[in-house]
Image (cartoon, grey):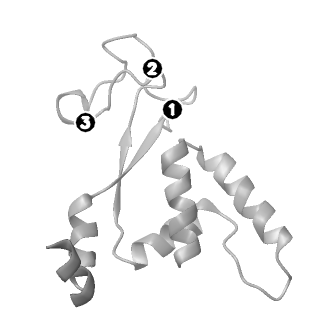
Amino acid sequence: MSTALKLCNLKAENGWSDKSFTALLKLLKDMLPEDKEFLDRTYEAMKVMRSMSMDFEKIYACPNDCILYQKEYEYLEKCPVCGRSCSKTNDKFPAKVSWYFSIILRFKRMFKNAKHAKSLI
């Protein structure tokens, strides 16, 4: 679990796409001995994150990083800043997705441990 968390943090910090992250996971799995189990897809890593109460929210974004499609922009089909479409060519999938991990859930999890809670206060 800690490996999945650390890898997901790297993905978020460096802005890796799901495709590049899956390629990294497959490479790491190939490097480990065959008897060791390891995640090999982004979907599996996110499943592990959810099991640790690390729910996340997917927020669609402009491919040029102009805006996030939420609140007043939630139902727009084109970016009001650059005019680029918010979806890929087949109009079914968003062109760019940001992953938002709520800080509140992180604090709740940290305060469950008495030792950490004392340090945090």
- The picture places residue 12, in percent across and down from the top left corner, at 49, 50
Q: Earlier in the sequence, mark 2 or mark 3?
A: 3
Q: Is 102 on the left-hand or right-hand side of 47? A: left
Q: Secondary structure at mark 1?
A: loop
Q: Earlier in the sequence, mark 2 or mark 1?
A: 2
Residue density around tag 3, few if under 14, some if 14–19, many if 20 or more, within 10 Å = few
Label 2, label 3: how far apart the Cα atoms are? 15 Å
- The picture places residue 77, in percent across and down from the top left corner, at 36, 23
Q: Residue at x 52, y 60 (%)?
A: 8
| Amino acid type of the residue that numbered disc 2 sits on in the rendered structure | Ser
Where is mark 3, residue-wise?
A: 70
Please, is residue 81 above or below residue 1 in the view? above
- The picture places residue 2, in percent across and down from the top left corner, at 53, 76
| Label 2 close to label 1 by CB (< 8 Å) | yes
Q: Nearer the viewer, mark 2 or mark 3?
A: 3
Where is mark 1, residue-wise?
A: 95
Q: Secondary structure at mark 2?
A: loop
* Identity of the residue furthest to the top in this view: 82
| Amino acid type of the residue that numbered disc 1 sits on in the rendered structure | Ala
Q: Is 72 on the left-hand or right-hand side of 116? A: left
Residue density around tag 2, few if under 14, some if 14–19, many if 20 or more, within 10 Å = some
Label 3, label 1: how far apart the Cα atoms are? 15 Å
Q: Residue at x 65, y 63 (%)?
A: 41
